[in-house]
Structures are given as C-alpha cells and as structure tokens.
Image: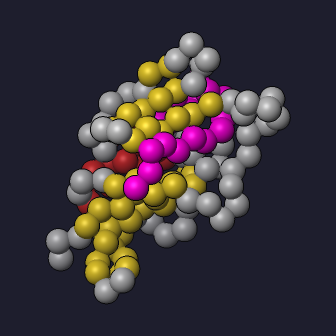
Amino acid sequence: MFSHVVVGSNNIEASKKFYDAIFTAAGGAAGTVDAKGRVAYTDGNARFLVTKPINGQPATFANGGTIGLSIKSPALVDAWHAAGVANGGATAENPPGVRESGGKKVYLAYMRDPDGNKLCARSSYPG
C-alpha cells in the first residue's frame, strides 16, 4: 500500500537499463524519462521513480531498507532476478526460492540494484 517509491542513482542511464530489464521481465513496461531526467515506472496508481538526489549529493542506499515488489508468479520472480543480475544487479541474501512467512509459503528473490538499493520480489507460492 504505497503511492510511490523513489530511489537515488548516480548513473541514471545504468539504472534505467537495470530497471527496464527487471520490470519488463516481470510483465511490466519500460520506464519513461521526464523533463527533470527522472525515470518513472507506473502500475495503476503506484509509481517507482529513479532520480539523482535533489540535494546534489551522491546517491547512497538505505542500510536496512528493502523495497518489496509484488510479482505475479514464481517464474516471473526468477525472470526478474535473472534480468537484474544480467543488467548490473547482484543477488542479495539467499538465491531465489520458497520461504515461510506468517505460516504461508512465499517465493522471494532479493537483489541489489547498481547503486546498492535492496529490492525484493515476492510471489505467492502454490505448493
């Protein structure tokens, strides 16, 4: 339940390549660049944006922070993860797989983007 998430980047071109790859692999669309050079990804009323920091300082990741993304199926989570690693991302924590959460099985993959932001793709698990 969020309206938008914004991550900072020191290299918008590399970030757009990475995020275009993971969002299209998960069934979404490539981002659009606005007049201020920000990249935006929209799904319904939710937006994910990538921008250089407004204060002019270098972008850094949030230590302890994770951005969770809802993905439709375990197969798309795997495609999301593979696309990210192939486009400058790095696996974070354990490889993609089934985890127990609140008595339910979920399928998760953790990854860091080229600037170190931690992402998690989550899908329900039918098994």
Does the magenta portion include 91? Answer: no
Above or below, 97 relative to 43: below
**Against 8, is 104 above or below?**
below
Tell me if residue 27 can be seen. yes
The residue positioned farthest toward the bottom in the image shown: 103
**Image quarter of residue 70:** bottom left
Question: Foreground residue, 13 or 60?
Answer: 60
- Quadrant location of the N terminus? bottom left
Examine the image and state in which quarter residue 59 appears: top right
Q: Position of residue 124 (x, y in %)?
A: 25, 67
Which quadrant: the C terminus? bottom left
x 57%, y 34%: residue: 50
The stretch in magenta equals: 1-21
Question: Residue at 70% across / 60% down in the picture?
Answer: 63
Q: Whole-percent x and y of residue 44?
A: 30, 38
**Would you say residue 86 is visible in this rendering?**
no
Q: Residue furthest left?
A: 126
* 4 in magenta: yes
Residue nearest the viewer, comparing 2 with 106:
2
Q: Is residue 34 left or right of residue 73?
A: right
Q: Nearer the viewer, residue 80 or 7?
A: 7
Q: Position of residue 6 (x, y in %)?
A: 57, 41
Q: How many marks?
A: 0
